[in-house]
Amino acid sequence: MSRNTEAVNIAPAQPAAAPGIVSRGNTRFSELEELIRILEGHAVTPVFQPILAFGTGEILAYEGLIRGPVDSSLHTPTKLFEAAAHAGFLTELNMLCARKVVRQFARLGLRRQLFLNVTPQTVLEVKDDVHRIARFIRDCGIDLAQVTIELTENQFISDRSIFRDALMLFRGAGFRVALDDLGEGFSSLRLWSELRPDFVKIDMHFVQGVSEDRVKFHFLHSLQQIAEGCGSALVAEGVETEADFCILRDLGIHNAQGFLIGRAAADPVSALPAGVNRLLKASAPLFSAETRPPRT
């Protein structure tokens, strides 16, 4: 699924440069060495964060996330994937993380959906290996219908038709598709209309503070109407307060993810916190009738 990381050639030393440039160069070199060490040692750890389904009041899925070694400068996923992108090893890292997440998900026996983060570049580069990837997942004891490919938002898609054709190969094999962070990066309304994903994740900027922001309230209400017309299910990210949770519940947003529901963990929660269960049964509106959008 990936190229041999041992084949990396380190570029020869460059001519002397200004101190600031040398410093940045040394940092890049150190990051490259650390990245290769991580890739060769498969030194990444999966963690899982629960996603709540408002309709059932249960955990719908877990998003598989990744951490680098605790003692590493590339411990956080942001730094880890930025280093891989700079070094040209983004697909290698993405596939290593995917394999690790799938295996651990199976070991934990999590009988829910798995949201698997994949970059658009990876989709394009491994599209000819779809059946081999599907076989690997089934061999781990996971049904393909359990797996949702969550397209990360940090890459621009230059040719949408080619990307759509590549993604269709995965959908044809049985995978579901989610767009990550609507409102950021490539996840535009146009891409939503073209790809018709099963899930659309709303960037936390539009979620956090919605209980105190009428603009965000109306924005989410509009997205919910679009989702119903497109046959997609929304996932509100970054849910951290009870007030925001209740607004999402009242708006009819399908799913929610965030610290209030559960943090990412190596051994994630299997049941919702008591406080979340209480909120699911409550029904006190937080906006007055005058400020709420009309019900349809």
Image (cartoon, helix red, strand yellow):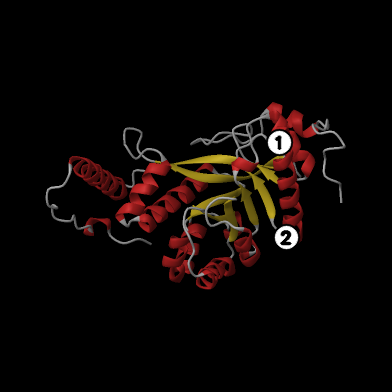
* Residue 45 visible in the shown view: no
Q: How many marks?
A: 2
On the image, the x and y values in percent for residue 107 come to: 49, 44
Give the number of the disc on residue 213: 1
Disc 2 target residue: 231
Q: Amino acid at mark 1?
A: Asp
- Density class for disc 1 (Cα within 10 Å; few <14, some 14-19, many ≥20) is few
Q: Quadrant of residue 179?
A: bottom right
Residue 150 falls in which quadrant of the image?
bottom right
* Residue shown at 70% from the left, 34% from the top: 244
Q: Is residue 2 left or right of residue 177?
A: left
Question: Which of 133/120 is in front?
Answer: 120
With respect to residue 13, does 65 lie above or below?
Answer: above
Using residue 14 as the reference point, say whether residue 152 is left or right of it: right
How dense is the environment of label 2, judged by Cα within 10 Å: few (below 14), some, or many (20 and up)? few
Q: Is residue 79 visible?
A: yes
Q: Quadrant of the N terminus?
A: bottom left
- The x and y percentages for residue 66 are 44, 43
Q: Nearer the viewer, residue 143 or 266?
A: 266
Which one is nearer the viewer's eye here, 74 or 4? Answer: 74
Percent position of residue 67, x then y: 41, 40
> In terms of secondary structure, where does tag 1 sit?
loop
- Please report the residue visible at 53 percent of the width from the left and 69 percent of the height from the top: 160
Tell me what residue is drawn at x 76 percent, y 34 percent. Answer: 280
Of label 2 and label 1, which has the lower sequence position?
1
Label 2 – label 1 distance at C-alpha: 27 Å
Residue type, numbered disc 2:
Gly
Relative image position of residue 162 (x, y in whole percent)? 50, 72
Q: Residue furthest top?
A: 275
Residue at (55%, 36%) from the top-left corner? 268
Q: Please tell me in which quadrant of the rendered image residue 55 appears.
A: top right
